[in-house]
Amino acid sequence: MKKRRHAKILELINSNDIETQEELQSYLLKCGFEVTQATISRDIKELRLVKELSDKGRYIYSTGKKAATDAIRRAGGIFSESIIRVEHAQNTVCIKCFPGMAMAVCTAIESMEWAGFVGAISGDDTIFVLCKTADFAKIFTMNMEKILNVKNSGN
């Protein structure tokens, strides 16, 4: 029951601008889920829902995934202005940057959600990214190149 309710909550917040727990409770009731405010509060915590500003200027429940997409879009500018090349070897990615830019790029990378990302360390012009596997390093490199190409083609 809990898994179905969690799935329904995610569906509801993705398709509706829900501002309050009471509003979420009302939507759930219409869908056949009779829950208390305390249960909704626990569900919100377990699902790690956040409130973010909607396009309409209201704070609504969200999974935060949209924020990750926005972070990639914003970081694209930092990446395109700073990165010279991206290469991977085994489960490590080496990112060469213009002098003095590696720390900003590293900070942007660490603020995003990357599959298989373990961590990153930067110097002045070089970043090493550690991935869980060689496949994740390859995917990370391809995604970085995709971000760089999309950003560069828009200029």
Image (cartoon, helix red, strand yellow):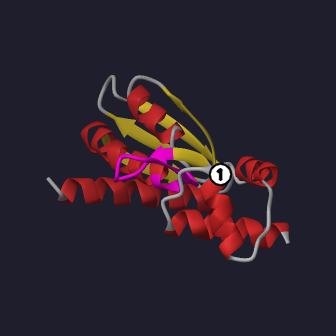
Q: Tell me, yes or no, whether the highlighted magenta stretch contains residue 101.
A: no
Q: Which residues are magenta?
A: 52-66
Residue that carries the numbered disc 1 in the rendered image = 21
- Judged from this view, the residue extending furthest toward the left is 155
Q: Tell me, yes or no, whether the highlighted magenta stretch contains residue 55.
A: yes
- Judged from this view, the residue extending furthest toward the right is 1
Provide residue 19's location: percent of width, then percent of height: 53, 51
Q: In this figure, what is the number of numbered marks?
A: 1
Q: Is residue 116 visible?
A: no
Provide residue 68's location: percent of width, then percent of height: 48, 50
Mark 1 crowd level (few <14, some 14–19, many ≥20, 10 Å Cα):
some
Q: Vertical placement of 99 versus 82: above or below?
A: above
| Drawn side of residue 114 relative to residue 54, left or right | right
Amino acid type, residue under disc 1 in the picture: Gln
- Of residue 49 and residue 18, the one placed in the foreground of this image is 18
- Of residue 21 and residue 133, the one placed in the foreground of this image is 21
| Drawn side of residue 42 relative to residue 141, left or right | right
Under circle 1, the secondary element is: helix
Residue under the image location 48 percent in, 59 percent down = 17
